[in-house]
Amino acid sequence: MASVGSNTVKKLEHDASEELCELDLDQISRCTNVSDLFHGINRDLNVIEQKQHQQKLRLTGEGEANTGVVDGDLKRNTYQSHEPHSIDPGTTSSPSTEEFLAGGLSRVKTLLYNSDPGDNSNSDQRSKDGPSNIARAVMLHMVEKYPNLLPRLLDQISLPSMPFEARKDVSAIFNHLLVVTSRYSVDECQSVDTATLNSPANDASYSSVYVKYIDSKYKEIMIPIVKGHESPDTALHCGSMLRSTLRHPILYQRLLCPNEVSKFFYPLLDVYVHLPNFDIASDALVTIRDIIIRDRGTAAEFLEREYCGIFTRYNVMLRSENYITRRMSLTLLGEILLDRSNYHVMIKYISTRENLTIIMLLLRDPSSIIQFEAFHVFKIFVANPNKPAEVIKILALNKVKLVAYLENFHSDKENGDDQFRDEKALVVTALKCLEEAL
């Protein structure tokens, strides 16, 4: 990109304002031409990026020295309107470029979710039936006409200059397209290429091309999505986008690749689940759970391959001072260990002294909910018929205290939960038998 001086940026904004004065945001909100909308969004984004570029140059002392001419392609053209222009005589200032960008994104989102102008059909049914004509047009513009637009919009999503509604709309557009394309199989996604977008094609063709597009720009797309978890303003939007990618086996398996795990999965375990903000931590845990249970066979292989990296981090989560992190992590741990697909992972986990010690401490957690969840993991250690010597030793050293504690453990739940009552009795009996065996 050419260096841009402050005069050039001002000229860009001036030129954009001169053209925009013929259109108001209301007219943009009624535009039905996807090509015009994308053309305008791209122009607005160019102007915004040029402003940001100039600010960086100014910070380094280079701003006034670089006054190169910007390619005329960067000048923002108007949205094409098929209705007479309406100018508000009371308007004293033109909307900002950011507002026009937000307006264009909002209109694309509205067209997508309404399928077609005036169509009020159920959105879930539309998703089940596949992409609408509008969705196909949006895919075409993203994949072929403006292939770098989506990564650029995602780069902007964490910046304070992007309006809050625009962030929501970028997320909504991204998620909608992945939802409506998720009904097709891997084989269908691999059977076509990008040429199908230039000719009449079935829904599977459009869907596969869009998924392949996301895969081809995976790092450019995922880096800002993962980074967006840092801020309360963007964490929930970015979490929903990450989870939307998991709907597609190609993208799900890409996330679990050894080369991608450290960049796009481990940050959730290392950083975001430990943040004090409730929304960020809980949403990160929701994403982790979705990754681990989305495809149990694939996830089981992933957990075995990354066992040390995952469960070293997981034990840190179980000892977190953050209540929601401890609680949700413990609940998910129980799901993982009790899933038959994860048999080998379960055996490895319950054969480790450190893991048992952590769970025993959680049995005495101040939270009764965490105590109860810890019991459902502790029972697996006790029920293991092939306990390692180090596990037997820990249980034997603490058996008297454990039996006394468990005999009165959540007695109020026994009347209404027969399974819990029976399981608690079996655990206590097993501990007493362990005493006799020693």
Image (cartoon, rainbow, N blue to C red):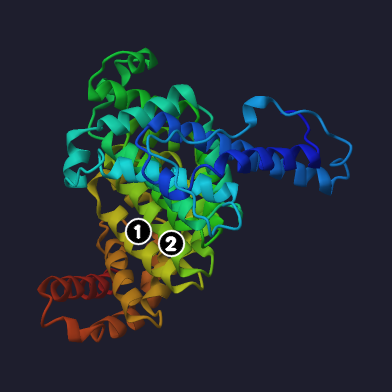
As drawn, 239 above or below 253: below
Location of mark 2 (residue): 355
Q: Quadrant of residue 303?
A: top left
**Quarter of the image that includes the C terminus:** bottom left
SS state under label 2:
helix
**Residue in view at x 35 percent, y 74 percent:** 370
Location of mark 1 (residue): 333
| Front tag of 1 and 2 | 1
- The residue under label 2 is which amino acid type? Asn
**Residue in view at x 43 percent, y 61 percent:** 355
Kindly give the residue lying farthest to the front in the view shown. 89
- The residue under label 1 is which amino acid type? Leu
The residue carrying pointer 1 sits among few (fewer than 14), some (14 to 19) or many (20 or more) residues within 10 Å by Cα, namely many
Judge by depth and name the residue closer to the eye, 272 or 331.
272
The residue carrying pointer 2 sits among few (fewer than 14), some (14 to 19) or many (20 or more) residues within 10 Å by Cα, namely some
Instruction: Judge left or right: residue 126 versus residue 148.
Output: left
Number of callouts in the render? Answer: 2
Instruction: Judge left or right: residue 321 versus residue 73.
Output: left
Q: Quadrant of residue 152?
A: top right
**Quarter of the image that includes the N terminus:** top right
